[in-house]
Image (spheres, grey):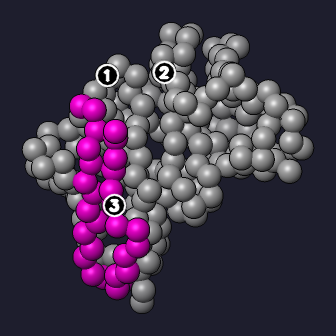
Amino acid sequence: GQNIDQPTEMTATEGAIVQINCTYQTSGFNGLFWYQQHAGEAPTFLSYNVLDGLEEKGRFSSFLSRSKGYSYLLLKELQMKDSASYLCAVRPAGNNRKLIWGLGTSLAVNP
Amino acid sequence: EPEVTQTPSHQVTQMGQEVILRCVPISNHLYFYWYRQILGQKVEFLVSFYNNEISEKSEIFDDQFSVERPDGSNFTLKIRSTKLEDSAMYFCASLDREGGTQYFGPGTRLLVL
């Protein structure tokens, strides 16, 4: 089967750093995505990793280890508007390019 | 910046009725998807569409569902006879090329009564 695991909820303080972990077991691997989703809205693309290592994009960074089936999203200098659900999604091998999604991690940023 | 659009934003329907959800993908994109998200649950893949045909569909996408790209811009999802459990947020997404990023529309919230 295909499975993506993330913590359900996390809490952090404004200005701090938070790391959201994701582990996956899928039938092949062709990239891992992080999306942000505010309640009642569409997922918004944050980052993409297909090779091992760290991808940095402003306040957001994402890390991938394919051998461990592991990724994390790092959010720095947290702001109140970062309170949202963070979804880890994997594109399995194959040509259809569908995404398999985790349940998402609900992040609450407190003042 | 180009974006995926969806209409309507909300749809309320009676069980057994047909609904059509509409999407306009980003204009130069080639791959199209429908996903759904039941309240409080994960996003679930329904169907992917490329080159005017379905390339993959999930177990959810049974005979009650169909997709069409009737012209060069619209991409529709039809549910023939809605059930209560079809109540969900339905997202359309499009992708420009293999290996690219899927961009999502704002979603249609469907409520079946």
| Stretch of the chain drawn in magenta | A1-28
Q: Chain of mark 2?
A: B
| Residue for badge 2 | B56
Q: Is residue B71 magenta?
A: no
Q: Quadrant of the C terminus of chain A?
A: bottom left
Q: Which quadrant would residue A30 be assigned to in this image?
A: top left
The disc labelled 1 sits on which kind of residue?
Gly
Quick check: B47 left or right of A36?
Answer: right
Callouts 1 and 3 close, C-beta under 8 Å:
no
Find residue A6 and name its label.
3
The local crowd at label 3, few if under 14, some if 14 to 19, many if 20 or more residues have their Cα within 10 Å, is many
Rate crowding at label 1 as few (under 14), some (14 to 19) or many (20 or more) other CA atoms within 10 Å. Answer: few
Residue at horizontal 33 percent and vertical 50 percent from the top: A4
- In the picture, the quarter occupied by the N terminus of chain A is top left
Mark 1, secondary structure of its residue: loop
Q: Are marks 2 and 1 in contact (CB under 8 Å)?
A: yes
Labels 3 & 2 near each other (Cβ < 8 A): no
Are dots 2 and 1 on a single chain? no
Spatial CA span between label 1 and label 3: 24 Å
Q: Give the residue furthest to the front.
A: A1
Which mark identifies residue B104? none
**Residue drawn at x 35%, y 19% as measured from the top left:** A95
B41 lies above or below A101: below
Label 3: state its secondary structure: loop
Residue B113 at x, y percent in the picture = 86, 50
> Mark 1 vs mark 3: which is more N-terminal?
3
